[in-house]
Amino acid sequence: MLPATADRLTLLLESTGDGIFGIDMDGCCTFINRAAAQTLGFSTDMVLGRNMHALIHYAHGDGRHYPECDCPIFNAFRQGLPCRIDDEVLWRADGSSFPAEYSSYPILEHGQVRGAVVTFVDISQRKQAEALLKRTNDALEQRVAERTQQLRELANHLETVRESERKRIAREIHDELGSLLVALKMDTHWLGRRLVERPELVAKCQGMGRLIDTAVDNVGRIITDLRPSILDHQGLWAALEWQAQEFIDASAGEIDATLQLHVAAGVDAPDGGLAIAVFRIFQEMLSNVARHARARSVRMRIHVDDPPDPVLYLEVRDDGVGAAAAALADPQSFGVIGMRERAGHFGGRLTIDSAPGQGTRARLVLPLAGAGAP
């Protein structure tokens, strides 16, 4: 190399802000620029001829020994494998370490590897910024999770209050309005028996009786919509089966609907808020099919695993028109949101698989903690 060219190269190496050093086939330093020596805390004389792995790369950040045979820097000339690493540390003359990003490339002369050239930079500030960003993101995620949990608890509280109010209203309708209708029915019957000589009045009483019967049926339907008594008296499994049969009957043969129900022996039906949540989710699934699916067939499947850790699998599958993913993710899809929130509050997961023209599958997976019986 011409002296002028060598001088320009030396000037270039000394002027760059990145640390640069070269090593021979034994891993010993052949040159080092000013930035590298200053960053490492060595003078040039202290580095030249020294094994660079043993000098600045001998240990991991946690202090574990770093074998020379595993060193990516040396693999550049031993195996011809260039590298770029940003998750290791280099060690200073005073025994302290710093996170570094380094690269190592083989030096070729007449097609033969003669060593490697290494560039490195101290990335302490970058790592600190990344750590700060991670802490900030973690704190933000924690706050979002806490706020989400608070909102979920509030939603569940409101749902519990609403169910309690439904139960109270249903009971009052049954006790008050139901008894009044029964009394009216009896009075109408009594009056009709005493007006046998007035056929027109007898007919009027019979008509009133039919109206009262219709009112009794409507009151019963309203009570059932508010709070199915079977859920409180016979439990969740019977309530789900009843709701499925109601859907089958309501389809009047226009939909080929079937139900598969299997509950493993020894699993008691959950009660309280968990039972209400499962029942309302099932109701919403069937309601969506009836209102939107335009399906020809519906398959309902309810399966509960064996104790001691039973899991409820509840699935409704139809062959209807389906829905786009955007529609299911729409913030205005309150039915879907409500089902997911009910499931999430009790540690369950609701998934809906659907596509236009491909039908829909709604599936609830819910652990029944404490539901298993010995």
Image (spheres, rainbow, N blue to C red):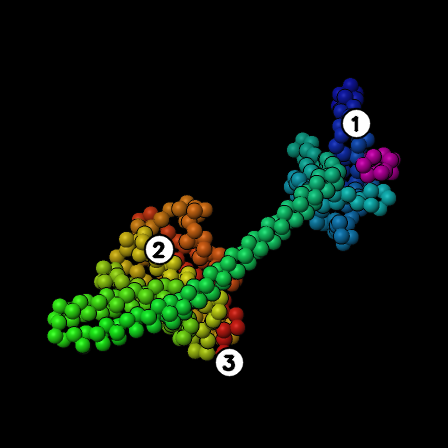
Q: Locate residue 225: give its quadrant.
A: bottom left
Of residues 177 and 295, the one drawn nearer to the viewer in this rendering: 177
Task: Please report whichever mark, 1 or 3, sits nearer to the chain's N-terminal start.
Answer: 1
Q: Which residue is mark 2?
A: 288
Q: From the image, which quarter does the N terminus lie in?
A: top right
Contact check, label 1 and label 2, Cβ < 8 Å = no
Q: Secondary structure at mark 1?
A: helix
> Which residue in the protein does label 1 denote?
14
* Residue 267 placement (x, y as % from top left): 46, 75
Whether 113 is drawn above or below 199: the answer is: above
Q: Residue at x 82, y 39 (%)?
A: 40
Q: Residue at x 28, y 65 (%)?
A: 215
Residue 43 is one of the magenta-drawn residues: yes
Amino acid under disc 1: Glu
Magenta stretch: dominant secondary structure: helix
User: What's the CA distance linking mark 1 and mark 3?
Assistant: 79 Å
Q: Which residues are magenta?
A: 37-49
Residue identifier under label 3: 374
- How many residues crowd around disc 1 within 10 Å: few (fewer than 14), some, or many (20 or more)? some
Q: Inspect this view and state whether residue 113 appears.
A: no
**Residue type highlighted by circle 3:** Pro
Between tags 2 and 3, which lies in front?
2
User: Which SS class for mark 2?
Assistant: helix
- Residue 357 circle label: none
